[in-house]
Amino acid sequence: MKRRIIGLLGLALSASLIASACGSDSSSSSDTAASTDTLAIPGTDSSTPTAGGTIHILSQLEQITHLDPQRNYTGSDLAFVGSTMQRALTSYAYAPGSAGSQLVGDLATDTGTPTEGGKVWSFTLRGGATYEDGSEVTCADIAYGTSRVFATDIIVDGPTYAISYLDIPQDADGNSNYPGPYTATADQQALFDKAVSCSEDGKTITFTLSRIVADFNYTVTLLAFSPVPKAKDTGEKYDMAPVSSGPYKIESYEPGKSLVLVRNENWSKASDPIRNAYADSFVYEFALDPAVIDERLMADAGDDQYAVGDGGLQPENLQTVFTDDRFKDRRQDDYDPYVSFTAFNVKTVSCVEVRRAVYLGLDREALRTAGGGPYTGDFADGFVKPALADDYAPSKLPEGLNTDGTPNIESAKAALAEAKTKCPDVYAKATVEGLKFFHPDTPIWQKLVSIWIESLKAVGIVIKPTAVEPSKYYPTVQNEETDYDISRGAWGPDWPNASTMIPELFLTTGGFNLTRNGDDPAYKQFETDTKAALNELDRKAQGKKWQALNQFLVDQLWSIPGTFTKAQDLWGSKVGNAYRWSSSGSFLFGELYVKQ
Amino acid sequence: MSAKVGTPLFYSPLSYLRIALITFIARRLLFALVLLAAVSLFTYLLFALLPTDPAALTCGKNCKPELIEANRVRLGYDKPIHEQYFQFVKGIFTGRTYGTGDIAFTCPAPSLGYSFNQHECVSSLIGKTFPVTAFLSLGAFILWMLLGVGTGTLAALHRGKWQDRLTSVITSIGVSLPTFYVGLLVLFSVVIWLQWLPFPHYASPSENLHDFLTAMILPWITLAVLSAASYTRITRNGVLEAMNEDFVRFGVAKGLKNRTVIRKYVLRAALIPIVTIAGLDFAALLGGAIVTESVFSLPGMGRLAIRSVTDSDLPVLVGTTLVAAVFIVMANTIVDIIYGILDPRVRLK
Amino acid sequence: MNNVRLLSVENLNVEFSTSDGVVHAVNDVSFSVHSGKTLGIVGESGSGKSVTASSILKLNTGITASTSGSILFNGKNILGVDDKAIRAIRGSEIAMIFQDPLSALNPYYTIGSQIIEAYKVHHKGVKKKEARKIALEMLHRVGIPNPEARIDEYPHQFSGGMRQRIVIATALINSPKLLIADEPTTALDVTVQAQILDLMKDIQRENGMAIILITHDLGVVAETCDDVAVMYGGRIVEKASVQELFVTPTHPYSFGLLGAVRSLDNSARGELQTIAGSPPSLLNLPSGCSFLPRCSYADASRQQCASFVPPLQNVLPTNSLSACHLRAEALNVLKIKEPS
């Protein structure tokens, strides 16, 4: 699901993302983690936001992937649509830095009330919210919107948590017995209405889940749980003209050209404590060449003074933008949501000493330099990014790991020597037969592979590379049949909770587990602890559990942490609030304002 | 000198010529039809034989196998290839309805398939994007022909003088520049740095002529300047060659004006080889000026094609490829016919 | 109308500047043509004969050509008139036809339209229908069978001989006083050649026009011309009546040419055999007589031949003019040496 977007992004757009799929050190990453909170946050300044003006968003894309709230599933689109047109039950705070991962009520008065240990969730509606036609947003609309997710032949591409979480019977194949609102019989509709119900007074919506989901109130930040007025639902066509419940509405939308948003006069600030809606309008300009976007932002002329890009800067412009003082007040070099990593096939590389030897001996610095240098990211110290403030703690990395990413041959050789006695089979495989390393067949990887081979040769480990056609890479390594020892990937959280990172990457049921770790002696322990964390309703206590699990993963080294990847932005000189919103890794578009 | 005019005209040579020309054109058209059939078959097979499963591409990230199978049936991908191709061709003439009952949808003739990515009939996607490409191509074509033939003729008539040398320097640079960088440079300098023009936002000429022209002028110039360079060369050489023709000297010896000689004798001869190249270049452009459309954000068919590649949107890819191929075949045919009209030696062979 | 001096060329010089240097294509050439008479200009390729002919219609006015001297036509100096005036003369008073009938007609237009065009350019305001009638008459006159059926055909639909007839029809449509025919029969086969020459002579008899016939074929000269100018290296080396040239050539080059013809078993139609050696480059003309390197008679006067360009002067007892340092007696002696 989301992994595919991220994975492909990693392959197609950012060679760096995959380039530095290797190690980190505790001191440097804890420094950077600290810096997020203590240093001035990029994109924020002291000027007071003012209303009015038009913000331009320059995009390489042909269109917004999906405007239909139930189909919207990428960080940047969620931030854009969520902050302008679609309200949800809960949201993350509209604030820069780690404050932006704070959960707050949106259509709901608060962040919801779990009962039965987190199996039933209730949200009280704030009331007073209206659509662009002035009609009221009702509890039934939220239920109806949620029900659309089940119509999987029409409502495609969106997140399907509603299907997997709600207490609706499924058949043997795992398909829901509820086919969505368009084709459901009365009996089938009753199944859904039982799982999602509104109180008599229409003020409370209650979700009954099939199991405990401790962070379901995070799940409902997704616009898949946003209201859709049944009378206005046009099914597949809704994607082009959804009804707005936010401060802006569509004036015109021509894919390949532009999307223009103007104020929704029927939105009232009184009903919406989150959105500030400073700008009068937004113009999303599509299908621009990335080189053109960068050049327009750098030139900062005319309307481009009010412009931001939605895709970050091109690598070739980074040097100019970050060394020229002209840009000093309108640039940022900050984390995006992703973590890159190198995964072992734990079935075949079943010896932690060998995995550690690889980690210690690999020239991670050379890999990062070849992939684009420090702009690509910081060496990661685990699988949870500092932006997940509750869940992150600096981890203790293996003894001897060099903080600057350079290899420590001595320690690596020592680890290998340990392996020789402890697990001679794997030792022989690593030193004689060779470890099969699957990588995407791209020019950058042809360079990186030789760094892998050369730096591990110094340790005594043999790497046997296999190049895979880029678009086939993830299907190949996710296929249980594929005989690899080492692969690589990158992943970002669906919401600011390590529950969308650690279980996805390392549970055997996870969406992107490349490690085949189910038979590892440590797995049972991991699975038990992870389920406990997932079921923990106290967010702080849950965070502690994720921190401990993150350390556990760094000790087991089923995967080697790569980098906490970064992205770089530049924006027009008269754009305010151009900070990167931690929950989406993009600008919080609706909050951008025109500086007077 | 008391010659007598011969017998009355029972037999009209004009109609004989007309018949010859019509037969010639008919022959060309027939050949083009055969070629088109072959091209469509080849294009369809090419994509049908790709290892990609077109049905699997029809639904999004959270797709279920049943949905894929349902779509396979709906789109006819469950049938053997020859039948798929037959349905495809039939759709071009009669339109095509996919599926049955409530979920059926119809692409009217000429149907080139249905894009599940964009939820639209391929022919309507092409219909929307093609005018942009056509306007772009046509404007650029006219501009570059005027520019290329004009400067080429000028250079030839001033052979060896500064006009000729200047042209030669400019064209040597022109033919070696890549469109992408010239496009960017033109856009950057005129729009972003100097701000002589607003950033282009394409509108169709009927809805906003001003926007249309401001969006088109730079791509026209970019394409025209780059293509004109080679046409200048061809024209210059053609004119110089033609000026050495005996019939040109004979024309001068008849007492014709220079202008008449250049128009009727020199250019007529010099332009014939240009027709061939121009026709094919124009057709290639109609198939999608991918780079120019991308740089200048024009919503044309080239961008549609590129997008279909990145999205693995197979039906659109087949459709755009086929349309581009049709243009090439048509251009070839038209070039042949124009050739026949321009040069009687060809048609009466 | 005969014996009126129609054209008189005096001291004509034509130079072309090229990147390699100045090409002296025509040097100090003088001759005259009388109405009703035919002047042959004979010489090898590159001897300057075609350039001389082109000068008469100012067809050498390319950017690199420079012409001096005078060309008096009907008392008017052609070299002095402007573009408009020369256009009025071209095709109307002086017409020109070219060597290759295959390429002299514009392949993209019907022959009718080309003849009509030639007529109308000098007869403004004439209706197309009338012009077409005249064109048909002319085609008929030059021997195109069934001209009504063929006037709207294209040049490539005609044979070479027919095309040259069409070219002649085009050239003569305005009844010019002078026809310059540049190798009109070279590209045609032998029987057709004779027909074309007969046609030209017939028309000349009818209308009394003068003809300048440029050729390298002495057979053609013998059959057609009244007077002959032999050109070599951009100069006229001998000027004579056709009878005197053939009976008593006065220049060693003319001997050579005639000898070559005669050696062909009395066939007066033989192709010109090349004389040993090659014609001089007009880019670097030798000082003195340009024929000297190929001349087998110059032993006695070699010093003189190498130093001075011989002037054209009368060689008694003939009426011929010859540009040779050898004296008549010597020439007679050498003529005997000529191999048979």
Image (tube, coloured by chain):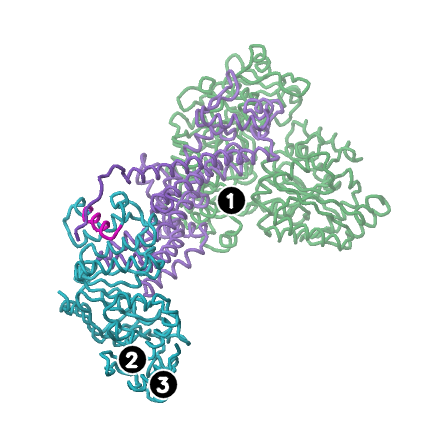
Chain colours: A green, B purple, C cyan
Using the rendered view, name the quadrant where residue B78 is placed.
top right
Q: Which residue is under mark 2? A: C250
Instruction: Give SS at disc 2.
Output: loop
The local crowd at label 1, few if under 14, some if 14 to 19, many if 20 or more residues have their Cα within 10 Å, is some
Is the N terminus of chain A in the top left, top right, bottom left or bottom right quadrant? top right
**Mark 3 and mark 1: span between their CA atoms?**
92 Å
Q: Is residue C54 visible?
A: no
Residue B245, placed above or below residue B12: below
Residue C45, placed above or below residue A62: below
Residue C78, placed above or below residue C142: below
Q: Which residue is under mark 3? A: C298
**Mark 3 and mark 2: span between their CA atoms?**
14 Å
Q: Magenta stretch containing residue A55, yes or no?
A: no
Towards the viewer: B185 or C130: C130
Q: Which residue is under mark 1? A: A312
Instruction: Give SS at disc 1.
Output: loop
